[in-house]
Image (spheres, rainbow, N blue to C red):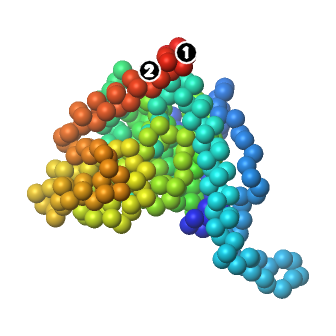
Amino acid sequence: MCATCGCGNDTVGVITVGPDGSADPGHEHGRDGPPHTHGLGDEHGHGGQEHIPDGGAPHTHPPATETVSLEEKVLARNDHLAQHNREWLRGRGIVAFNMTSSPGAGKTTLLERTIRALPGTPIAVIEGDQETVRDAERIAATGARAVQVNTGAGCHLDAEMTRRALHTLDPGPGTLLFIENVGNLVCPALFDLGESRKVVLISVTEGTDKPLKYPHMFAAAGLVLVNKIDLLPYVDFDLAACTDYARAVNPGLEFLPVSATTGAGLDRWYEWLAEQRRAAATSLEGAGHPV
C-alpha cells in the first residue's frame, strides 16, 4: 500500500514476454537476482478504508495524524530495498534508468527506436503498467529482453517490484537497463528503484508549464527529454520557458529536444547513454572490479 497516494500493490504481477510475443505470467527465474529483504512491518494496510470484522461494528483506522509516520515507514522500507537493488546492479556493471513521464509522452516508442539504433549494446527493459503486456510485447519485438510488471491499482513501480522483475529478467553484466515506469509524474518522483538516473520524458503537446505543476519529478531528474518536437509548428509550446521553469528547481538540468518518431535529436541521446555507461565502467574499475 502506498501511503502517499493510497494505491495498493496486492495484485502486482511480473510477466515474462518472449521474442515471439508469448507471455508467461507469474514465471520468475534468475540465478542471483537481488535478495529479498524483509521490511519494516506490514505494508498491506487498508489504505484508510473502513474495516468491519466478522460480527463486529464498523470502525475507522487511526486519524490523519498517523499518515505521516506511515508514509515515512513505507518510503524508508522502499529506500532500503532500492539500495540493495542499486548495489546488485552496480556490482554487475549494469546502468539502469528510471524512465518517467505522463501517459502517452512516447516512452515506449523512444525505447523501441533506441534499441534498434544500438544493436551492439546489451539492452533489457522492465515495463510498468497497471494492466496488459502490450508494451513488453513491443519491446520484445525489437529483440531486447523484457518483463512486464502489472501494478493493478498501483500508480507507480517501487523497489520491491523492481527486485522481483530483476530476478525474472536476470540481466547480464554490462547491460543497459531501462525501467519504464507507470505513466505518472507524481509518485515515481518519491520512490527510488535503485536506478542510476531518473530520466523524465515530456512532450510538446503537454504544455510549457509541466515543471511548475510537477516540481518534485524535475528536481529528481538527471535528464529531461522533450519529445515530439516534430509537432512544434502546430502546438503552443515554449521550449526556453519550459527549460527555465525546470532549472528553477534543478539548476544545471540537461534538456534534449528529440522526436522519437522522426529520430531528430536522438544522436545526442545515444551519446548521453554511452557517457553514462563509460562513467559506470570507470567507477567499477576504480573500485577494483573487472568490467
Question: Tag 1: Cα neighbours inside 10 Å, few (<14), some, or many (≥20)?
Answer: few
> Is 191 situated above or below 124?
below
Q: Residue drawn 36% across and 40% down?
A: 111
Q: Nearer the viewer, residue 99 or 55?
A: 99
Q: Residue drawn 65% across and 70% down?
A: 67
Local SS, label 2: helix
Q: Nearer the viewer, residue 279 or 252?
A: 252
Residue lying furthest left: 233
Report whether residue 7 is seen: no
Local SS, label 1: loop
Tag 1: amino acid: Gly
> Is 239 situated above or below 87?
below
Q: Position of residue 195 (x, y in %)?
A: 50, 40
Residue lying furthest bottom: 57
Q: Along the horizontal axis of the image, is 259 left or right of 139?
A: left
**Quarter the N terminus occupies:** bottom right
Mark 1 vs mark 2, CA separation in Å:
10 Å
Q: Along the horizontal axis of the image, is 51 left or right of 243?
A: right
Chain-order first, disc 1 or disc 2? 2
Image mark for residue 157: none
What residue is pinned by disc 1?
Answer: 288
Q: Residue drawn 64% across and 31% down?
A: 33
Q: Along the horizontal axis of the image, is 124 left or right of 117?
A: right
Tag 2: amino acid: Thr
Q: Along the horizontal axis of the image, is 159 left or right of 204?
A: right
Question: Tag 2: Cα neighbours inside 10 Å, few (<14), some, or many (≥20)?
Answer: some
Residue 176 location, quadrant:
top left
Residue 49 location, quadrant:
bottom right
Image mark for residue 282: 2
